[in-house]
Image (cartoon, helix red, strand yellow):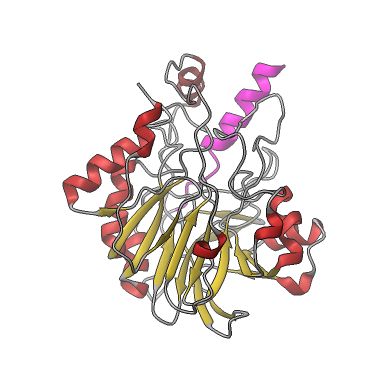
Amino acid sequence: MKLCMLLLILCSFIFAEENIMQQLTDTGRIEPVFKDGKYANPTPSVKVNAWNAFSSRAKNKAKTEPSEPLPTDSVNIAKAFPESKDGLHITWLGHSSFMMQIDGVRVLIDPVFSKNISPVPLFSVKRFQEEPPISEKNLDELPFIDAVFISHDHYDHLDRQAIAALEPKVGFFLAPLGVGKILRDWGIDSAKVREYAWWQEGAIKGLSGQILNFACTPSRHFSGRNPFARNETLWASWVFRGKVHKVFYSGDTSYDVHFRQIGYHYGPFDLNIIENGQYSVHWPSSHLMPEDGVKAHLELKGNYMMPVHWGSFNLSIHDWWEPIERVSKEASEKGVNLLTPRIGQSLSIDEKLTTLPWWKDFFP
């Protein structure tokens, strides 16, 4: 029974995308396909062998988790969310969760506080850290957050525990189409929830009085919080445009033409936050290989690149340190300004930035 359930989950993960030919609008912008109540990526998914993928997991000998808990910095709230209305300040909270203050507007991206992100307790996916940098235990330290942005509905990006804990401190919850229903079902006030299609733009006025413009943009992934309800909600990346600064967040994605399109319409960016990790040759249409992440960054026309989606959870079959090692090597060869903060560390993008390969202290 356990074997059948694991195979079912794996197959639904691999074949989540429909094989539909690429469709472009007359503006040259790639659009999702919506058919029979489900979304699909316009670019066809790569066909893979489900049994080979399952066998690779069963036979995997990679060190997918660190031998000891990885450290987290104690978040400096004054540095993460300074009183100044200027500047771009980023704090990585592990995996794809981070805090950002962009030209005076405060946001949280894909906040996850849980120690285990598996929907099935039998298949535990535990955090590499003993505690996340921000959790219900120190939530009182956070100031009012103007908005929470969600990229898609997977458990490692949409965490019910975090959403419930944050709700009293948040002005708006902004998400791709369909995800709003999940939030409302969890008890979030409908007045706080906004949903967006690809290329739809919006703006919020922060408590500081500053305006943040944003755009919901494409990614190449899939959705669903269980194997029986796939692709009923949209997945997305996000563009953030403050008074001075611009930031791109990839969400979960594999490589596709959307990076060039987003770079053309909205670039260049001060910072690109790019998915890096949980990839495999067995599901090439769902996640970026590290080298493709660097390629995407260059097409987006970014200054700094910050790799995320690694360092906190194991969802694949590679060594836990492999994503950051590979992306660091590729970035060095391509002359890319790579930022590799510690989990919990805050960076001010306008300052002279140096980050260290801290992870090397924790693998052989």
Percent position of residue 249, x then y:
45, 60
Q: Nearer the viewer, residue 261 or 171?
A: 171
- In magenta stretch: residue 354: no
* Above or below 316: residue 293: below
Residue 86 falls in image quadrant: bottom left
* Above or below 360: residue 90: below
Residue depicted at x 57% and y 66%:
107
Residue depicted at x 58% and y 61%:
108
Q: In which quadrant of the rendered image does the C terminus lie? A: top left
Percent position of residue 276, x then y:
40, 44
* Above or below 195: residue 158: above
- Image position of 176 (left or right of 278): right
Percent position of residue 73, x then y:
51, 45
Dominant SS of magenta comes to helix
- In magenta stretch: residue 17: yes
Residue 207 falls in image quadrant: bottom right
Extreme residue toward the bottom, this view: 209
Percent position of residue 294, x then y:
29, 50
Residue depicted at x 63% and y 28%:
8
Q: In which quadrant of the rendered image does the N terminus lie? A: top right
How many tags in the picture? Answer: 0
Residue depicted at x 35% and y 60%:
259
Q: Nearer the viewer, residue 45 or 106?
A: 106
Q: Nearer the viewer, residue 194 or 171?
A: 171
Residue 206 falls in image quadrant: bottom right
Q: Which residues are magenta?
A: 1-20
